[in-house]
Image (cartoon, helix red, strand yellow):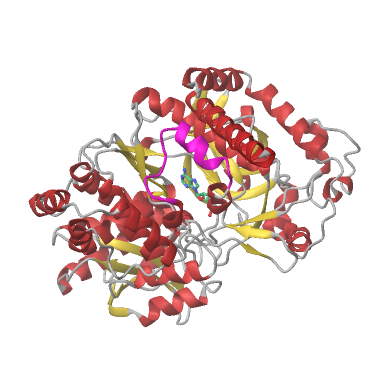
């Protein structure tokens, strides 16, 4: 009897804890968050010094810092004098010791027990990066900050989010360290769901779908959940915009099957994962009315324009990272979103968050990100210092002289250097940003590109952004045939003299030979840097080659990365495929259906 009373008491206690938690959820105070951000950014210089001090004090016992002779000093000047700029390569020996199970204080005071696996689509293979509770904390801070500003402009209440999020598997390294992608580490944190509820962004899909082992099955069920809760969905989101476009392209293929499932209340036999089947069968009830409604809506649309608001009449906006390498998907997103606003999310990486979108009304093309001065210590290498160097080469780091957060100049471009609370000190992230202005005294950044040069043969230098512009220009030629580029990448072919650029395109239908030939010429003409055009004119660079690949090729590339441990949530199509990516190059080469050589400079 006593035992029963005790059990009941414990249950009551639990209920109370849950109730308190829920009350805390409702307590989220937007105005307070905005006020805090305003205060912090008004004094960004001081906040940066304090942040650095905190990071260095918390990690003073770390072997890495001990060896650098800081001797307890925490001011930016001593920090810069003692600690070198590094890239991931220099940290690898330390990171590998952690992965292999060395539990001493290597990079941080408190040993690292979890690693994030970056998507690795830029360098070809995923990188391990230390993860800890402080990084989760900064993740929540940035989510709350941008939510507060966003919700002021686009309020949502008691809503659900159709979030195309996918968790990768978390595994143990041979040294017993847990590893998964950064988004997985966030999704798996017990606080995540609660905090997202407070931000009105609770995913309408159950955990079994988010954490499912098969990407396609998860995607199918995300769509199904979205349709079941179609009236409650107030926003459609993903981490990177690519997942949203991918989801609705898939919807175009499977919508009739989804309607059948809803009509009959029986889940498609495609879904084979038992835990997903179990949870979905609880949600799915025969609902012919809803099935007919969706069917009628789909049939009524012209080429799927405005699909998102049609399916989710109460959606207020579409949300996800839409800048940088996501910009090529904007056109397709606008098509699906119709009149709904597209809001770009925040700016960060597996290495840590950097800046929030606090001007949500700006279209993604004009979006800026305001740096949160309390979540890391940030330095900026003026691009002019890197111009004559190979930007990714670290041995030249000693010649570089980054400036502090509040010393950057409007209109200038910089490479970002991060010091975070998880063991990265003066780490060159490899991103180039442009300072567009200031939010109080904290800079507002525009993401420009990854810093590594993409296409170069001799004196030509073309970046990811240049490639994007060229593809956009040639895409307009293709649009004359009512076709579009589904995805693209590039390669420098040096197998024959002279070397030349190769652009791989996947398009969504059959185009005439003439139009594709024109597209190829347009691509060649659209690389306008003087190094390229002058080399082309004298044939030091050969004619650009457009290689058309089979439908589904880029899906195969995505699957290849998933096999390496990446997650769709963080996936970015590699925009240049070189010797570090032999498998991807092979996938592309195996799927080429047609090739065109430019005659633009004949
Ligand atoms: P990952 O570590 O795989 O999550 O990739 C992080 C990288 O994604 C960053 O270093 C940027 O290059 C890119 N990225 C993240 N957020 C944004 C953003 N808001 N705009 C453009 N690119 C971004």
Q: Is residue 447 left or right of residue 288?
A: right
167 lies above or below 203: below
Q: Is 195 covered by the magenta stretch?
A: yes
Number of marks present in the image shown? 0
Q: Where residue 390 sits in the image (x, y, percent)? A: 61, 57
User: Can the viewer see residue 235?
Assistant: yes
Q: Nearer the viewer, residue 350 or 273?
A: 273
Q: Is 255 covered by the magenta stretch?
A: no
User: Can the viewer see residue 419?
Assistant: no
Q: Is residue 139 left or right of residue 298?
A: right
Q: Which residues are magenta?
A: 189-206
Q: Residue 3's image quarter?
A: top right
Chief SS of the magenta region: loop
Q: Nearer the viewer, residue 480 or 356?
A: 356
Q: Is residue 533 left or right of residue 417?
A: left
Q: Where residue 591 sits in the image (x, y, percent)? A: 34, 79
Q: Where residue 348 sits in the image (x, y, percent)? A: 54, 43
1 lies above or below 273: above
Name the residue: 56% across, 50% down. 188
Which image quadrant: the C terminus?
bottom left
Q: Where residue 294 sits in the image (x, y, percent)? A: 15, 50
37 lies above or below 118: above
Q: Residue 215's image quarter?
A: bottom left
Q: Residue lying furthest front in this view?
A: 1
Q: Residue 418's image quarter?
A: top right
Which image quadrant: the N terminus?
top right
């Amino acid at each position: 009897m006593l035992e029963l009373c005790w059990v009941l008491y414990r249950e009551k206690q639990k209920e109370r804890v849950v109730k308190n938690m829920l009350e805390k959820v409702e307590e989220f105070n937007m105005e307070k968050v905005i006020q805090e951000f305003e205060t912090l950014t008004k004094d960004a210089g001081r906040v940066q010094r304090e942040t650095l001090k905190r990071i260095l004090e918390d990690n003073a016992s770390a072997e890495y810092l001990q060896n650098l002779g800081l001797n307890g000093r925490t001011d930016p000047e001593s920090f810069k004098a003692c600690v070198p700029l590094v890239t991931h390569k220099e940290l690898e020996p330390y990171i590998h010791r952690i992965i292999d199970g060395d539990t001493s204080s290597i990079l941080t005071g408190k040993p690292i027990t979890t690693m994030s696996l970056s998507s690795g689509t830029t360098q070809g293979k995923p990188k391990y990066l230390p993860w800890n509770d402080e990084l989760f904390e900064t993740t929540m801070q940035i989510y709350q900050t941008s939510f507060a500003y966003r919700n002021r402009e686009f309020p949502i209440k008691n809503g659900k989010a159709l979030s195309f999020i996918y968790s990768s598997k978390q595994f143990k390294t041979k040294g017993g360290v847990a590893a998964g992608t950064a988004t997985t580490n966030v999704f798996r944190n017990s606080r995540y769901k609660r905090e997202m509820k407070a931000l009105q962004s609770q995913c309408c899909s159950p955990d079994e779908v988010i954490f499912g082992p098969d990407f396609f099955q998860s995607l199918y069920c995300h769509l199904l959940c979205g349709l079941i809760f179609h009236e409650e969905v107030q926003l459609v989101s993903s981490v990177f915009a690519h997942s949203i476009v991918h989801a609705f392209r898939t919807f175009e293929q499977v919508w009739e099957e989804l309607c059948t499932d809803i009509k009959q209340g029986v889940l498609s036999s495609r879904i084979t994962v038992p835990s997903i089947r179990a949870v979905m069968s609880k949600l799915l009830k025969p609902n012919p009315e809803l099935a007919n409604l969706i069917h009628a809506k789909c049939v009524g649309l012209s080429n799927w324009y405005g699909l998102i608001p049609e399916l989710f009449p109460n959606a207020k906006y579409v949300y996800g990272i839409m800048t940088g390498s996501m910009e090529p998907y904007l056109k397709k997103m606008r098509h699906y979103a119709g009149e709904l606003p597209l809001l770009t999310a925040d700016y960060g990486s597996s290495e840590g968050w950097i800046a929030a979108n606090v001007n949500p009304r700006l279209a993604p093309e004009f979006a800026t990100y305001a740096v949160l001065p309390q979540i890391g210590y940030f330095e900026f290498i003026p691009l002019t210092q890197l111009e004559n160097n190979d930007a990714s080469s670290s041995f030249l780091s000693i010649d570089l002289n980054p400036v502090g957060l509040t010393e950057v100049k409007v209109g200038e471009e910089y490479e970002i250097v991060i010091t975070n609370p998880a063991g990265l000190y003066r780490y060159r992230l490899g991103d180039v940003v442009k300072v567009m202005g200031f939010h109080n005294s904290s800079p507002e950044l525009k993401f420009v590109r990854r810093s590594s040069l993409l296409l170069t043969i001799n004196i030509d230098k073309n970046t990811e952004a240049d490639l994007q512009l060229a593809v956009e220009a040639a895409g307009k030629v293709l649009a004359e045939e009512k076709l579009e580029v589904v995805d693209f990448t590039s390669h420098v072919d040096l197998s024959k003299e002279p070397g030349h650029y190769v652009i791989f395109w996947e398009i969504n239908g059959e185009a005439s030979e003439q139009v594709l030939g024109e597209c190829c010429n347009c691509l060649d003409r659209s690389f306008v840097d003087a190094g390229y055009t002058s080399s082309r004119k004298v044939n030091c660079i050969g004619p650009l080659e457009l290689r058309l690949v089979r439908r589904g090729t880029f899906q195969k590339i995505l699957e290849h990365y998933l096999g390496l441990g990446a997650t769709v949530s963080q996936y970015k199509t590699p925009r240049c495929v070189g010797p570090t990516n032999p498998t991807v190059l092979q996938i592309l080469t195996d799927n080429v259906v047609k090739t065109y050589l430019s005659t633009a400079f004949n």
